[in-house]
Amino acid sequence: MKEYQSDKIRNVALVGHGGCGKTILTESMLFTTKVTNRLGKVEDGNTVSDFDKEEIARKISIGTSLIPIEWKDCKYNILDTPGYFDFIGEVQSALRVADGAVIVMDASSGIEVGTEKVWKYTIDRKMPKFIFINKMDKENVNFDKLLNDLREKFGKGIAPFAIPLGDANSFKGIVNVVDMIARIYDGKDCTDQPVPEDMMDGVSAVREMLMESVAESDEMLMEKYFGGEEFTTEEIHEGLRKGVLGGDIVPVLLGSGINNIGIHTLMNMINDYMPSPGDIKVVEGVHVRENKPVQKTIDEKEPFSAYVFKTIVDPYVGKISLLKICSGKLTSDMEIYNPDKDEMEKVGNLFLLRGKNQINVSKVVAGDIAAIAKLQYASTGDTLCDKSNSVRYDKVAFAEPTLFMAVEPKAKGDEEKIGVGLNRLTEEDPTFVVIRNAETKQTLIGGQGDMHINVITNKLKHKFGVDVQLAEQRIPYRETIKGKADVQGKHKKQSGGHGQYGDVKIRFEPADEDFVFTEEIFGGSVPRQYIPAVEKGLRECLESGVLAGYPVVNMKAILYDGSYHDVDSSEMAFKVAASLAFKKGMEMAKPVLLEPVMKVEIVAPEDYMGDIMGDMNKRRGRILGMEPLGDGSQKVIAEAPQAELFKYATDLRSMTQARGSFTMRFERYDEMPQHLSQKVIDAAKSEK
């Protein structure tokens, strides 16, 4: 692949709902640009972008694939992203480095949840975008209805740049409304023909709509339009491009990836209307030493800087870092600085990735995307730069994990291998976390949903050779007392030789703090040197309560009396006496089980509020408040026991058709209802 300058590069993310045909669209582009000589199929597991074992087995995209292609003396970096919500982090990182997006839709399904979500992401990032209606060859597709639905949902900026020629099996091409030509496809090539006479009225009406958009892009053009003058071809293209780059116009294109229809037009449009890095001009960052905002010009002559947006971990090849060059140029053997880790890195092999295939290059310029193998310190989200002109770019705010499961080894002794494998996989996927819970002795993995968790465990097996099973996470319950008790703990052992004697009287009562120990000893009934032993004995007992063996909290112990023996008393004897008093006192002081309560913030469209609140009540939850968010969504703030929220990620998704999201954090411990706490106590006893 030859070298391209910044103005000849287009970085475009293909985004959309799962199953809308992004990967097959990528295949069509590869075929049209003659990179491949046949169209791969997702069903056959032979596409360029879905090369991972998991992707081939599941027949879906799991990671973003980078597919560079050449078209009309330009280089396109196509980022083929997953559509399933469990892999949302891949979409977020792809949009971070893309300059424009193509939102792909399935013509037979219309606007789906994934369409709405990626629309919102692109709006938030102020990205120029197209909508490509794929699968126009399917039965019962109504293009006019699709167009109306799009305009109703996303506004008047939706502008059809093409209309279909034929439908279902007879769908053979499109009419390019901008250039007023019909484009007929034969599966390989496309030929230009005059617009059929019987379509002229419909095409003219759509074109008039486009001319209004052109007029709105410039005051002089507006005057020309109202003066009844015709626009020149250059004015039309310039006006439309200005509207697309500004986000005021969203072109609608159409075709069929599987039949290679509409692909030439899509690629021409990317060339004509999508921004090049030169259109964007600058990237915002922060000066590392001075900690103040700085702008880097997207220019080969500037000092080097880049952003690492994806990491691929391979047990055999090692780590591959994918990065977008923000300024300057990158060459093999360069020394580069990582301000996030404060380390220097040596660039070894510099290459482009196309799926899993590496294309070696000697230089990559500002605006382009490249890959480096075996960087020692770099991880996803890091900035790499010239040390004397150090800069740091904002990291992607990835979605937080919402579903946690415990992993347990199937074979004994695999714990270390599990730890190593999981840590390597977190390098690859920032939306996945590993937590070691010291209290419950479980290793927890957190992800975006069931499929995400299953993919992680399968990768663990296939990439790192370790088999695990999933289990529900254990809840870290607590025990406390609600009443008061006044007890004696006496330890007396005198059977030949040196005996043991310790005797304490202790009052137990509830407290606001975890544990409070005081003493009210008068007259030396318990000698001073033994009081620390009493406290130590009680503190050791706090680790395991009398109900189900959980840690004890919110208790006060007052040592007020006791007795001792001149010869047989010892620290150990008083520790044992204290533990006897603790057990007796806790049993008498109305012990109860406490459960962790989480604060949950749920965001979902207003239509689902009734279901969400009803469901939260069933989970023993409490609604604390609601806030309207202005986009037809509401935020619900609630509290609910952790035990009721293990599968909430899955349940909320099905309840809201994946339109809802939530965050959750620990709030406090509350007393558990008697009938439920008894089940926990019985389970703990049977386990023992």
Image (tube, helix red, strand yellow):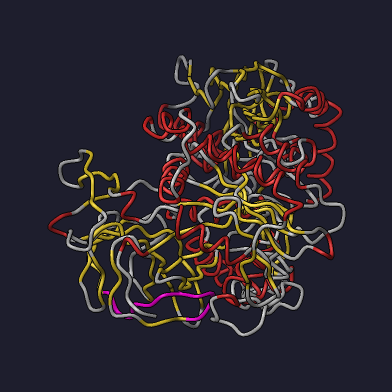
- The single residue placed furthest to the bottom in the displayed view is 37
Which residue appears at 30% of the width and 57% of the height?
A: 326
Please tell me in which quadrant of the rendered image residue 258 appears.
Answer: bottom right
Look at the image and tell me whether residue 682 can be seen. Answer: yes
Which residue appears at 60% of the width and 49% of the height?
A: 161
Image position of 533 (left or right of 286): right
Viewer-proximal residue among 199 and 42: 199
Viewer-proximal residue among 642 and 591: 642
Residue 548 % position (x, y)? 74, 39
The magenta region covers: 347-357
Q: Is residue 417 magenta?
A: no
Residue 307 % position (x, y)? 35, 57
Image position of 127 (left or right of 621): left
Viewer-proximal residue among 671 and 549: 671
The relative height of residue 195 versus residue 613 in the rendered view (above or below) is below
Residue 639 % position (x, y)? 67, 24
Q: Is residue 356 magenta?
A: yes
Which residue appears at 70% of the width and 37% of the height?
A: 659
Image position of 558 (left or right of 524): right
Look at the image and tell me whether residue 493 can be seen. Answer: no
The relative height of residue 20 versus residue 27 in the rendered view (above or below) is above
Please tell me in which quadrant of the rendered image residue 223 appears.
Answer: top left
Viewer-proximal residue among 147 and 194: 194
Residue 340 % position (x, y)? 29, 54
Please give the count of numbered marks on the rendered protein.
Answer: 0
Image position of 76 (left or right of 431): left
Q: Quadrant of the N terminus?
A: bottom left
Which residue appears at 16% of the width and 59% of the height?
A: 387
